[in-house]
Amino acid sequence: MRTIVKILLATGSALGLATAVSAQTTPAAPAQSTDASAPVGDIIVTAQRRSESVQKVPIAIDVVSGKTLRNSAATQLSDIRQFASSVQFTETPAEPTFSIRGIGTNSFDYSVEQAVGLALDDVNITLPRVNVLSILSDVDRVEVLHGPQGTLFGKNTTAGLISITTHRPELNVLSDEAHLQVGSRDQVEVYDIINIPVGDRFALRLSAGYHMQNSPLRTLGPGTVAATNDQAFKAKALWEPNDRLTIYAIADMQYGEGDPGVWTVRSFGQGTYAPAVGNQFVRTTLTALGVVPGPDNDVAAIGTDNYLHTRSWGGQITVDYRLGEATMTSVTAYRHLERDSNLEADETPLTVLNHNTSDLEAHQFSQELRLSLPTGHVFDPVFGLYYFEQGTTAQQDQSGGLGYLPNGFALRLSTVGGLSNYAVTSRSYAAFGQTTVHLADRFRVIAGARYTVDDLTSSFFVSPLAGVCSPAALLTGGVPGCLAYVPPSLVSGGSRDHGDWSGRTGVEYDLAPHTMAYATASRGYKGAAVSTVSGYVFQINPETVVSVELGIKAALFDRRLTLDLALFHSKFSDFQTEVFDPSLGPTGAFRTGNAGGLRAQGVEAQATARPLPGLTLTGGVTYNDAHYTNYDPPCYAGQTLAQGCNLPGPTFNAAGDRLTNAPRWSETGSLGYRTEIGHDLAAHAGIDWSARSSVQFGVGDPGTIQAGYSLVNASIGIGDTADHLRLGLFVRNLFDKRFAAQIFSSFFDTGGYSQVLPDAAFRRFGATLDWHF
């Protein structure tokens, strides 16, 4: 409480200083100059479904440019964490997920949506386990919108939105832009972008990219960890047949291979897994191979090849038609995903649970119509209609000896007795609108609402799979009985029809030229789900949030300094989260459930400054108190009655426990310097830094704590002053700091823990070459 009070006092002082300084500052016209000594120019975003300066949007926003990502040698969308203090990333074996202000959704279930929405070129992407952008080519900017954004962006944005915007084709411009990056672990990334004008009113933009890099993990068993191998192709067309009509079309394809999330042993347990054959296989086998558990353990000993193959493609057409001052926009989009993987779960070369395969196919279609009026009037509304549909089918084989059968035995056991088959279909209909009412020159009121109707069906059944049977068969006939066992036709599922609303209201006030204060209240909604894990049906209630945000945005000293401050308080009800339920099957299983409530509150601050010619400084800090207020999850492995585990259940009271992967403190900072060195040459240098305080990945589980850590990246380069050619050197994770992106209880080893070490937890260095003509 004292910490919050101190921050609030500091924030209040800063607000007063910003107002005083801004009131004495001579207003300057917006600048887009490339001169490094120029004021900070306007950063244009589309956070409110219209193009406007980020300093005029009453939402806490991080904006990371494509140039910033390229210059720092970033290769994954998750690298935006280095520049956005409120963003976290959890690298789960099932579905890597983002969180904003500590809120995200970790779920193995195909019917559950994310709390952080992902949008690519104005289209929400909700396909499960999808890599939205495998290669960061042709990115203009990434906008991170904090807090619920359901009014304008839909129901799967209760925590916020990450919106990626790529470059549009340019009329009357012929250009070629290419990037080459080579580095450690045999890394190669290359892409090329060509802009081709066809007449005065039509242009094409074609791009192709390739990225390859070996895994940082070492393996001692016969199994392998796949290297990253991504390919991406995109074609864009822009046509302006007249001054009123614009047609923008995109088609793309992505192919990927890589690591599905192989984990390593963080600590051994007591080895008390039943049956008796399982008591010693984890510790004894791995120790004999030379595996040393620990937070820095980068050695896996797996018995089968682990792999992840993805294929995705899609297209969209955006049509803008100007009706006087109004603009009618239509966005039609389709995406398709195919994904197959194997992720061994027993962590040993033994055939305990060495088959953990998944074959998934999914598609989505969306249609949005919007009507918007320009700013500058008393009302500047945006109205729209939205339709969405999605279908997902998946087959999973999770089988092995399970400790009952000898190692290498020809048959495999599965908790369901065969092949698990999942199917989910969903449809969504929505109408929305938002407007700003200009009541006075300096005072404005915001009002908006969205109503959504969802229709979801989820089903599960088991089909026979050669060589796989149920452990129950052993009770009736032993191994011979298993040979003849045929699993029953287990069919389960359910459906949910639900309608709910999102909304936003607030006020804006211009304290001085280039200084705006705002206060908003928002309600967000995430749809209901039907979980069918292993044939057990669970109805998942909709998730809702009410969030209040107070903020100020100021541009000071001739706009050479920008300051953004925000205080937030979000209260969630029926939060959808993943829990491990030991009552499901002989080994337990993860399933999705509802936490009664949680609260996230804190302060965010961002600053950008150009104090000297050629020097740019940025910084961000987030203090976030995110904890459960009402939640009774299953007890974690090894939790005793004295530690709060209650019977029957077993469950424990998690009220007051922090959310998973939600650091109390997060900080980011960067320094960039550019100077001309003669002969039309310029030198560049940059360094960026991020720090996170400690987190835990299992609710209340002390064995899943990741200590706080910081990461430093650095780069230097030289090129011509017109930026046609640039050669650079880089190092990411300069001090080779290890950290886990996920920690969880080990399978088949009671009291033991495993971890996922992401690529960012290992030092990477190399060289880049960029050219633009």
Image: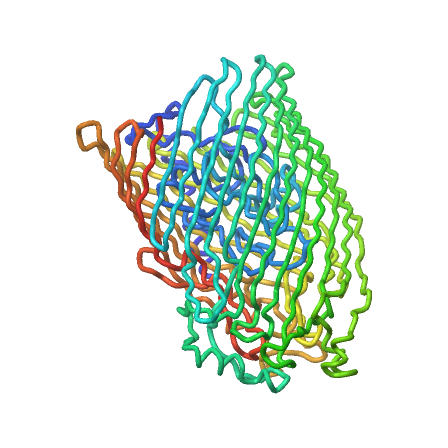
558 relative to 383 in the view: left or right = left
Q: Would residue 512 be found to the left or right of residue 151 on screen?
A: left
x%, y% of residue 114? 62, 51
From the top left corner, tell me how far across and down residue 457 is, in percent.
78, 51
Q: Position of residue 251 (x, y in %)?
A: 58, 33
Q: Give me the residue at 51% from left, 24% from top.
A: 204
Which image quarter: residue 722?
top left
- In this rendering, the count of numbered labels is 0
Left or right? Give the position of 483 relative to 116: right
* Placement of the C terminus among the 4 image quadrants: top left
- Nearest the camera: 4 or 702? 702
Q: Is residue 633 visible?
A: no
The answer to whether residue 259 is above or below residue 475 is: above
In the image shown, does 696 or 171 lie closer to the viewer? 171
Image height of 546 relative to 446, above or below: below
Q: Residue 454: which quarter of the image?
A: top right
Whether residue 614 sits left or right of residue 539 in the image: it is left
Residue found at the far bottom of this picture = 276
In the depicted structure, whether residue 212 falls above or below residue 370: below
Q: Residue furthest left?
A: 678
Q: How far from the left and from the top, in percent, is residue 210?
A: 45, 42
Q: Is residue 689 visible?
A: yes
What colour scheme has been applied to the protein in the rendered image?
Answer: rainbow
In front: 706, or 456? 456
Please tell me whether residue 205 is drawn above or below residue 339 in the rendered image. above
- Residue 136 or 235: which is nearer the viewer? 235
| Residue at 65%, 37% in the rendered image | 334
